Structures are given as structure tokens and as C-alpha cells.
Image (tube, helix red, strand yellow):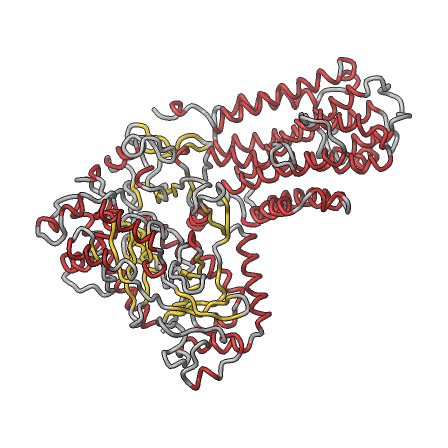
């Protein structure tokens, strides 16, 4: 403990000497340093276990990830460098009451966003009613005019969502961003749980953790709900950009969990507005694609003509209603970070309800007053490009240099529609095992929401950790790691 | 359950690469071992090894640099390193098709290759290192047989292994018999005994040969054993039988009407070996038979692709 303001802190033995609870909501400790009741079990265990034993278990977990090849690919340095996604030994615990709010809030959000997407690609009532400005929608890089008037199966645009939640200093969960295009990371959620069961079997059982292993079945039935042909068993495939994609491990993993084919663009071909895959027994019709390829690369005849990852003619098959895509084309318009700022109004417009999970305060750079404020206060704010994810295209004011701030100032002025700003959030912190110590690190939470015949959210998600001391960036490409997430039973 | 053509292609090559790695490892291990006792003929043996593997280094090499080149050189596509890494890459492409245990084994082999250097193994125990690779390949086969469905994918793995084996063994025989053309076929070899034992050991065949013919080494019998023996897993005839069996299974799985062409080619090769007699073959020249084996092998490879992998799409769309 750096700051020992209260009596109880001084009773901590070795592993917590570096632990800092000041300045953010701590998942394990109350502000007065006492242990939150749902963390008592893990706290006791940490006090009992010698550091060597923790180290041994961490090592065993790392080896298990490496040997199983649970890796992601880092772009940039050396083509196709594979790394393991750093795994932290200590679970993040969410109480049943907290989860209840999250679950209701996310269900509300995905429902409203689906209605929103259907609306803007058909009648655009929300624009005509002046709730969301048309300029904002039609200037969005991910708005796809080709989708105007296209009926998608079940009117379901987003079937798979990964929503990033953070817990603020006040202890409430906020939505930081919606990922409505091709959200990734769910395989790490599942793999972390597998490893956790080997690492802390007794603790895991004692705690009463809700299972997440049925994610594969839930995803499969979500896909099945989209099948356009009802009279035959649907042929569902997972479309991957291939082995050099950073999330390839996940694509293979999910295909195997669901028992479906993992295909690449070169396995598919279109004939007479029907999609086929090339098998050793000849061509076979495809009904549903769980696609992990971005819109831009799906069909070279319509989108990027240099793309080798997609299938020429796919959009026509889609428009003809002969294949379902999950997620639909053009969903990125609803996770644009400027459109994001309207989600509370979107929820109210379609559902007549207040948002259960609040947004983070967001400044739009197209608004003169807000922009002026942001340009004055770049050193305090976080600036993000509206269409980027993965921690790219981002300025964290408090950790920036004058040069970086000047660069973003120029970029904002040159293209205000492309940026938003938010206050620097003190993301909550959770205990992590760092070398021989337990230290506090900032975390977020990405639960995965499935929307087929019904909304399904497996209890948990991927808790990402900013492993560098003081860092607020949790992305795997930027030195982040992850840990298992336990949602407790009642 | 149907299989993607790309997956079949990848499994086939994964298997071929591992078989190739095992074969090269065995040749190299044997050569380093033989150099301890008969260093004088090492130079000629190196030449036969290189010819047998269809490789040619761009510069003159001593044993150390040759072993390094054949084992670790990443820029050399036939090195053991490259073969194992390629097998692992292929396995990675189809991870969801193979069992986790298979993936972990081939991944582990590639990791070990990456972590080792020639200096580490050279001064110490090169044999231990090569033995570990061979064991790794055998373990992979065992894991494959006991953890993967013996369905279509498994048959493509068999096909890859045995076609590669035929290819390598035919070449090895061709090079060896060309080098020892003067040795009488029907007499017990007098000089060069080590070289003939070496040939058998390159195919793990020494003990198996002795069980059939005793330790009396005669070139004709050795050729008969490696070419025509029906029970020894590294003989060409045995391998052709296995490839044929895999192709018949594939025809059943896929109900392909186009399988007839490739099955006919393998059947013809099988007949040549089933009904061939060694004296007849030696009379007409062993080399010409081996060339014929290799020529048909190329045709078979192409026919497999035409039937299952790169067939024209319009045949299926009406």
C-alpha cells in the first residue's frame, strides 16, 4: 500500500505492499481499505498462498496458452508475429445484482440499435423527426447506401455485439463503445475460463460462478434463426479473412465450437444469385454466413475492388434474400462514435425508456461550442477517431506530448466529423498478479450479446486489463491483457 | 459431413511435409552416425543424400554447415526446419479440422525447432536431437490415428503421407542403385556393406529385412524388399496399397463420379508392383521402373487435384 490511511490496510501482508487504491474505483477494496464481501474468498486465498505458488500457477497458465496456440497476430513489426494475449491469474468478480443491471441495459441497447438500423436503411423516421441529424448519418464512413431498402432476415441487423463497459469512479457502469461490426475477443473469454478451472479449481467451485460454456450453442442457434431457407437444414459457415488475420485463432475456435465450416472467400462462389462453397464432393449451397470480414472486403464488385478476401457477387445474393449475413452490412453506422452520443435518445425514441446503462459524456467536434472547449482542453480529454477501434487513432490528453496534441488539433480542425472527445475516465481497477506482487490495474468489460430469436448474453465477458502501471489502454495491440470474469449466482 | 476442397489440400500437404521432415531427419542422422566409422566415403554419401532429396547447396559445405543447411536453414525450403514449420502452418490453416492434440503436437515440434541451434546439437548429441524429431513425427501419427475421426480428412492425411513416401523411397533407390550399378545383384555384398545397411536403415528397413532374408545382404533382395514387399510399411508396394485404399475410401465419402480416373492410375501402379517380379524388373532396368513409378505418381497427384480440389465449378452448377 502506498497510502495507508486506515487501520485495516496495515494488516495486509506481503502481496499487497504495492497496491494502490487511491484515484479510481477499486473492484476489490472499499475506499476505506476494507475488502468488499464478494472478494473475501480470493483475498483470503491470496494471503495464504506463497508468492512462488502464484508464480508457478501463472507460469502454468502461460504455457497452456502457448501450447494450445491461443495467440493473436500483431501487425506492423514483423509480418504475422504471433503472441499470446497476456493472461492475468486473478479473476474479476461481478455480483449478481450488478450483472442484472448490465444484462437489462445491454438487452435494451441492442434492441434499440436494431430498430435504429432498420429505420435508417428504410424510412429514416428518426431523422425526419429530428432526433438524429441526417448529416451525421449520411456522412458516416460506414453508412452503406447499397443497403437502402434491403430487407434482412428477421429485421436483425446486429446478431453479435461486443459492448465495452467501464466502471467509473462513482461505481456505476457506463457504455464506452458499442462494437456492432465484427466484435472479437469472445474466444479469450472462453479460453480464460478453461485455464481458470485448472488454476483455482477449489476457489472457483466455492464461489458459485455462472457458466459460460454454452456460448457456442447460443451463437449457433442465433445464426440458425437467420436462415432464409426454412425447409432444409441450414448450411451455416464462418467466413474468415484467413490465417494472417489477427483474430484467426478465434475464428477457428468458434467454428469448432459450433461444428460449422470455417471458410475463406476463395472457398465460395456465386452462381445465379446463389452462394456455394467448394467441397471435395462438389459445390454445396450456403445459407448463413457468420462473417468476420469487414464490409469493405466482402464483395469486390461493390466495395473494395482489390479485395481478395470476399466473394464477387455476394451482395447480389444477399439482396436477393438467398443468404443471411451476421452481422448485416452497414451496421457500422450505429457504432460510429459520434452517432454513439445519440444512443440515449435513440433508446427513448424507439422504446420510450431511459437508458439503463448511461453513456460517457461525449463532445461532438461538429458542434462549434463543444469543439472550442475541446481544443482548449486537449491535455485533459481523450480524443478518438469515430470509426476506429482497437485503441488506434486515439489521443489520451493526460499522457500526451505537446506535439501529439498539436497533431490532433490540426486533424480535428481539418475533419471535425471524424473525431469526438470524452473526459479522461478513471477506469476502475482490479487486483492483478504482476511479478511477485498483487497490484491494481485499470480494467474494462466486454460482454457479448447475441440477438437471434431472443437476446442471449452469457454471464460474463472479456475483462481486459491495462497491464502497464497507470495505463488506461486495455487493447491487446497496446500492451493489454485479460482475465477471467466471474458473474456470481444469486 | 462434406469437406472443403481447401481443407483437403491443406491436410494433404501438412502430411506430406511431416513425412518429408521425417525422411530428411533419418538420412541426416544416419549420415552423421556413419561418418564416425567410415569418414572416407562420406563425400560420396553426401552427394547421394543431396540427389536423393533433390537438393543442391549453392556452395561447397563441410559436414557442419551441410547439417546446418539441411536442418535449420529457414531460407532452404526442404530443410527439416522449413518442412516442420510448413506442416505447422498448414495445420494452423485447418486448426478446427484436426484435433487439439494434433495441433498441440505439431505446434510443439515447430516451437522446438525454433528454439534449437546447430551449435547446441552439434557438439553435444546430434543423435538425440534427430531422434526427438523422428519421435515427434511418430507421435503425431499416433495422435492422429487415435484422436481424429477416420473420415475424409484422415484419408487425405494418409494419402499425403504415402504418396510422399513413395516419392522419396523411389528416388533413394534410384540414386543408390545408379551409384552401385557394378555390384552383382544376386551375390552377397562384399565391400561397401555399410552402404547397403545404410540404404536399408534410411527406410528403417534393416531389421525388417533381416527377418525376411537373414542378414545376408544382396542388392537384388534389398531392391525386392524395398520395392515389392507387401508387409513392410516403407516399401513402395505397401505405400501404394495404402494410397489406393485411401482413394477408394475418398470415392465412397464424396460419391464422386470423377474419382474413376485417379483410382485407375493408382490401380495400374498397384498392378505393376503386385504382379512384378524382381528378376524381370532388374532385367529391364530398375531405374526405368522407378522412373515409371515417379511419372505415374505425378499423374496421380494431378488427378487428385482435378477430382477433389481444383475441379472446374461449372460441372456442378446446372
Q: Residue furthest bottom?
A: A7
Image spot of residue B11 (x, y percent): 54, 37
Q: Residue at image x 39%, y 71%? A: A488
Q: Residue at image x 20%, y 52%? A: A365
Out of B232 and B40, give the one closest to the viewer: B40
Q: Could you tell me how many numbered marks the image carries?
A: 0
Q: Residue furthest left?
A: A129
The C terminus of chain A appears in which quarter of the rendering? bottom left
Q: Is residue A357 left or right of residue A352?
A: right
Evaluate whether residue A256 shows in this view.
yes
Image spot of residue B31 (x, y percent): 78, 34
Vertically, is A183 above or below B282? Answer: below
Vertically, is B167 above or below A253? Answer: above
Q: Residue at image x 33%, y 37%? A: A297
Image spot of residue A390 (x, y percent): 36, 51
Image spot of residue A446 (x, y percent): 35, 59
Based on the displayed image, in which of its 4 quarters is residue A207 positioned? Answer: bottom left
Evaluate whether residue A155 shows in this view.
no
Q: Residue furthest top?
A: B284
Out of B195 and B3, give the one closest to the viewer: B195
Q: Is residue A211 left or right of residue A358?
A: right
Out of B203 and A305, give the one closest to the viewer: A305
Out of A8 and A64, give the one closest to the viewer: A8
Q: Residue furthest right?
A: B190
Amino acid at each position: 500500500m502506498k497510502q495507508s490511511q486506515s487501520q485495516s490496510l496495515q494488516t495486509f501482508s506481503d502481496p499487497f505492499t504495492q497496491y494502490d487504491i487511491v484515484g479510481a474505483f477499486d473492484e476489490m477494496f472499499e475506499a476505506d481499505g476494507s475488502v468488499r464481501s464478494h472478494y473475501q474468498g480470493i483475498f483470503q486465498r491470496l494471503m495464504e498462498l506463497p508468492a512462488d505458488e502464484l508464480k508457478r500457477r501463472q507460469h502454468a497458465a502461460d504455457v497452456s496458452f502457448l501450447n494450445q496456440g491461443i495467440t493473436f497476430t500483431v501487425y506492423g513489426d514483423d509480418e504475422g508475429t504471433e503472441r499470446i494475449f497476456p493472461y492475468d491469474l486473478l479473476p474479476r468478480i461481478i455480483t449478481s445484482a450488478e450483472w442484472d443491471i448490465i444484462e437489462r441495459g445491454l438487452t435494451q441497447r441492442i434492441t434499440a440499435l436494431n430498430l435504429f438500423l432498420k429505420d435508417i436503411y428504410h424510412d429514416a423516421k428518426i431523422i425526419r423527426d429530428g432526433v438524429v441529424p441526417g448529416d451525421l448519418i449520411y456522412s458516416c464512413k460506414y453508412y452503406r447506401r447499397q443497403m437502402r431498402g434491403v430487407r434482412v432476415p428477421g429485421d436483425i441487423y446486429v446478431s453479435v455485439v461486443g459492448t465495452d463497459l467501464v466502471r467509473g469512479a462513482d461505481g456505476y457502469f457506463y457504455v464506452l463503445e458499442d462494437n456492432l461490426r465484427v466484435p472479437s475477443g469472445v474466444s479469450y473469454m472462453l479460453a480464460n475460463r478453461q485455464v481458470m478451472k485448472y488454476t483455482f479449481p477449489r476457489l472457483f467451485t466455492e464461489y458459485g460462478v455462472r457458466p459460460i460454456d454454452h456460448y457456442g450453442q447460443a451463437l449457433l442457434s442465433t445464426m440458425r434463426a437467420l436462415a432464409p431457407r426454412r425447409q432444409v437444414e441450414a448450411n451455416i459457415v464462418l467466413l474468415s479473412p484467413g490465417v494472417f488475420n489477427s483474430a484467426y485463432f478465434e475464428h477457428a475456435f468458434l467454428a469448432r465450437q459450433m461444428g460449422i465450416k470455417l471458410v475463406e472467400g476463395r472457398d465460395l462462389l456465386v452462381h445465379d444469385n446463389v452462394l456455394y462453397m467448394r467441397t471435395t464432393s462438389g459445390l454445396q449451397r450456403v445459407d448463413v454466413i457468420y462473417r468476420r470480414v469487414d464490409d469493405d472486403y466482402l464483395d469486390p464488385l461493390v466495395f473494395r475492388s482489390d479485395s481478395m478476401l470476399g466473394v464477387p457477387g455476394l451482395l447480389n445474393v444477399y439482396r436477393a434474400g438467398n443468404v443471411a449475413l451476421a452481422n448485416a452490412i452497414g451496421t457500422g453506422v450505429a457504432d460510429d462514435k459520434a452517432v454513439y452520443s445519440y444512443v440515449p435518445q435513440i433508446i427513448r425514441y424507439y422504446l420510450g425508456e431511459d437508458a439503463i446503462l448511461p453513456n460517457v459524456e461525449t463532445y461532438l467536434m461538429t458542434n462549434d461550442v463543444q469543439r472550442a472547449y475541446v481544443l482548449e482542453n486537449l491535455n485533459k480529454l481523450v480524443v478518438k477517431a469515430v470509426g476506429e477501434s482497437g485503441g488506434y487513432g486515439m489521443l489520451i490528453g493526460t499522457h500526451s506530448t505537446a506535439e501529439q496534441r498539436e497533431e490532433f488539433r490540426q486533424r480535428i480542425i481539418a475533419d471535425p466529423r471524424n473525431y469526438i472527445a470524452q473526459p479522461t475516465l478513471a477506469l476502475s481497477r482490479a487486483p492483478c498478479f504482476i511479478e511477485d506482487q498483487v497490484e491494481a490495474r485499470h480494467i474494462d468489460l466486454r460482454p457479448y450479446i447475441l440477438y437471434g430469436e431472443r437476446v442471449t448474453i452469457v454471464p460474463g465477458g472479456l475483462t481486459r486489463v491495462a497491464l502497464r502501471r497507470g495505463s488506461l489502454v486495455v487493447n491487446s495491440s497496446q500492451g493489454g491483457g485479460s482475465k477471467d470474469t466471474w458473474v456470481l449466482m444469486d | 459431413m462434406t469437406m472443403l476442397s481447401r481443407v483437403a489440400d491443406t491436410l494433404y500437404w501438412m502430411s506430406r511435409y511431416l513425412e518429408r521432415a521425417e525422411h530428411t531427419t533419418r538420412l541426416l542422422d544416419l549420415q552423421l552416425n556413419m561418418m564416425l566409422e567410415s569418414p572416407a566415403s562420406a563425400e560420396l554419401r553426401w552427394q547421394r543424400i543431396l540427389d536423393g532429396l533433390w537438393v543442391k547447396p549453392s556452395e561447397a559445405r563441410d559436414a557442419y554447415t551441410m547439417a546446418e543447411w539441411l536442418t535449420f536453414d529457414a531460407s532452404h525450403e526442404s530443410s527439416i526446419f522449413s518442412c516442420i514449420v510448413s506442416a505447422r502452418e498448414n495445420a494452423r490453416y485447418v486448426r478446427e479440422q484436426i484435433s487439439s492434440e494434433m495441433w498441440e503436437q505439431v505446434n510443439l515440434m515447430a516451437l522446438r525447432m525454433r528454439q534449437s541451434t546447430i551449435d547446441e546439437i552439434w557438439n553435444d548429441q546430434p543423435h538425440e536431437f534427430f531422434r526427438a524429431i523422428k519421435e515427434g513425427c511418430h507421435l503425431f501419427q499416433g495422435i492422429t490415428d487415435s484422436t481424429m475421426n477416420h473420415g475424409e480428412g484422415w484419408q487425405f492425411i494418409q494419402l499425403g503421407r504415402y504418396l510422399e513416401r513413395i516419392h522419396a523411397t523411389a528416388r533413394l533407390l534410384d540414386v543408390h542403385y545408379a551409384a552401385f550399378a557394378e555390384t552383382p545383384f544376386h551375390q552377397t555384398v562384399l565391400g561397401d556393406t555399410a552402404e547397403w545397411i545404410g540404404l536399408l536403415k534410411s527406410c528403417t528397413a534393416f531389421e525388417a529385412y533381416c527377418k525376411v532374408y537373414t542378414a545376408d545382404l544382396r542388392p537384388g533382395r534389398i531392391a525386392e524388399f524395398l520395392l515389392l514387399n507387401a508387409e513392410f510399411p516403407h516399401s513402395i508396394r505397401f505405400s501404394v496399397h495404402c494410397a489406393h485404399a485411401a482413394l477408394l475410401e475418398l470415392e465412397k465419402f464424396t460419391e464422386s463420379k470423377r474419382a474413376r480416373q485417379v483410382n485407375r492410375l493408382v490401380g495400374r501402379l498397384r498392378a505393376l508392383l503386385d504382379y512384378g517380379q524382381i528378376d524381370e524388373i532388374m532385367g529391364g532396368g530398375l531405374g526405368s521402373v522407378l522412373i515409371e513409378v515417379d511419372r505415374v505418381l505425378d499423374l496421380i497427384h494431378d488427378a487428385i487435384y482435378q477430382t477433389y480440389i481444383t475441379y472446374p465449378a461449372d460441372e456442378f452448377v446446372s
